[in-house]
Amino acid sequence: MTPEQKKDAYKRAVSVIKANDRGSYTIPTKGLYPFQWNWDSCFTALGQAHFDPARAWTEIETLFAHQWDDGMVPHIVFHVYDDGYFPGPTVWNTGREIATSGITQPPVAGYAVARLFDLSPDKNSVARRARPLIDKITRWHRWFHSARDPAGEGLVAIIHPWESGRDNSIDWDTAFERVPTEGVEPYRRRDTDHADPEQRPTKAQYDRYLWLVQHFRALGWDNSRLHDASPFRVVDPGFNAILIRSCGEVARLARQLGETAIAEENEALAEKGLAALERLWSAEHGQYLGLDRVTGKLIDSLSIGGLMPVFAPIPLHRAAAIAGRIAEMGEKVRYLVPSHDPAAAGFDARRYWRGPVWLVVNYLIADGLRRAGREAMAEKVIESGLELIFSSGFAEYYDPTDGTACGGGQFTWTAATVLEFIDSK
Ligand code: GLC
């Protein structure tokens, strides 16, 4: 990309984010996702920090205004009525004044808040906004370790594929077969009105997504029961890496703010998680693997989830191996980083999380590679992302073989990531 092209991409990215801004929160894209999504909002704030820092803090504050009493932060906040999305508030029925879903998403908030703080030149004024947030984020981190790691193993489980943020990853297929479909209430999907069905999850997967929602709803969304009662309990290395990094970042910020208790609590969680993450390393594959907590077995599936741990402070030789895996995949596809290994069975270049490139994942991986001293590979990952938006616009995801734009368009987090890529270069 030339400097002129970068300037142009920057301007277009800002206008995508502004067009999706609803005042105090930002929607991922019009039509397909008309509410506030948890990890989308945290990435959105990173983008907003480059042109409207005060608005960036508001994005995360709005999300945390909907934190549950038990500490969970829901994956969707249904701020307004919109019939164009399914499953809506009546299906979730979580009984909140402003409706939310009943499951969570990857905890990027801790990382995002620390980054907003780092980017701000006026630490005193942003400290006022950071303090209450790190308190709430710590409650969320604590919730993860009690509700999603009841046996104290050090790693947390997701109980619904949507929690991973990588909804239909091949990683979940085997464990997902355990989820029944009997008794699923009749429904009509809306996602396929907005996006090509060939690029979305299948009907069989949707039935199971909904069975889990109904099951948890029948248990009154009581998080002290959901983990053990779910037939789907998976320990995802990518998800845990985000949690570990966020704990570390909140701890670092808390030290700067003189909040010692918060710092110590997060440091302990990060340390415990990092040690436990080693159990997910596969020497055979040179990457991490998911763990099926119901069977106690590692999941033999080579997805991006097993590379995302580079975002956490893993040992440097592991980061080097991950850079090697990405290089290998780069020989098979034109654009990095495919969400599933193109050489593995099941890879599907255009189906959502079963192959396509997602720029937010590139962001996490590039950041981690940089921190681990793998600058050259980090650059390649960033360049791939910028080439994709240059050739195909601000799409939801992209075909890694030819760069075709997939899913929704004018996508907020894609635009936010681009601002980070361009401004930090
Ligand atoms: C899809 C993605 C998820 C994202 C949401 C809104 O469900 O899989 O990660 O948060 O869309 O963009």
Image (cartoon, grey):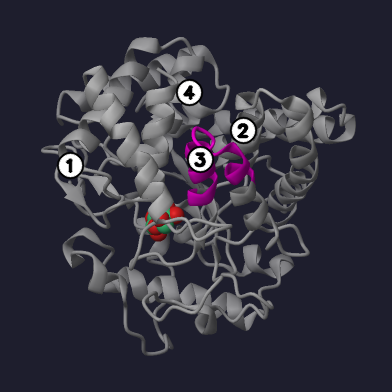
Where does the image place residue 240, in percent across and percent down from the top left? 57, 40
Segment colored magenta: 40-57
Q: Cα distance, mark 2 to mark 1?
A: 29 Å
Residue 172 percent location from the top left of the image: 39, 55
Q: Is residue 341 magenta?
A: no
In the rendered structure, does residue 52 fall within the stretch colored magenta?
yes
Local packing at callout 2 (Cα closer than 10 Å; few below 14, some 14-19, many 20+) is many
* Residue kind at label 2, given as amino acid type: Leu
Q: Quadrant of the N terminus?
A: top left
The alpha-carbon separation of the residues under discs 1 and 4 comes to 26 Å
Q: Please name the residue shown 54% across and 42% down the image.
A: 45
Kindly check if marks 1 and 4 are in contact, taking CB atoms under 8 A apart as contact: no
> Nearer the N terminus, badge 2 or badge 4?
2
Q: Which residue is mark 3?
A: 48
Amino acid at the residue labelled 1: Ser
- The residue that mark 2 highlights is 116
Closer to the eye: label 2 or 3: 3
SS type, badge 4: helix
Residue 65 lies in what quarter of the image?
Answer: bottom right
Amino acid at dot 4: Gly
Residue that sits furthest to the left in the current view: 402
> Is label 2 in a helix, a strand or a loop?
helix
**Residue drawn 67% across the image and 51% down it:** 61
Going by the numbered disc 3, the residue's amino acid type is Gln
How many angstroms separate mark 3 from mark 4 (CA)?
21 Å
Judge from the rendering whether residue 209 lies leftward or rightward of residue 98; answer left or right: left
Work out whether residue 333 can be spotted: yes
State the residue position of label 1.
392
Element type where label 1 sits in the image: helix
Q: Residues within 10 Å of mark 4 (few under 14, many from 20)?
A: many
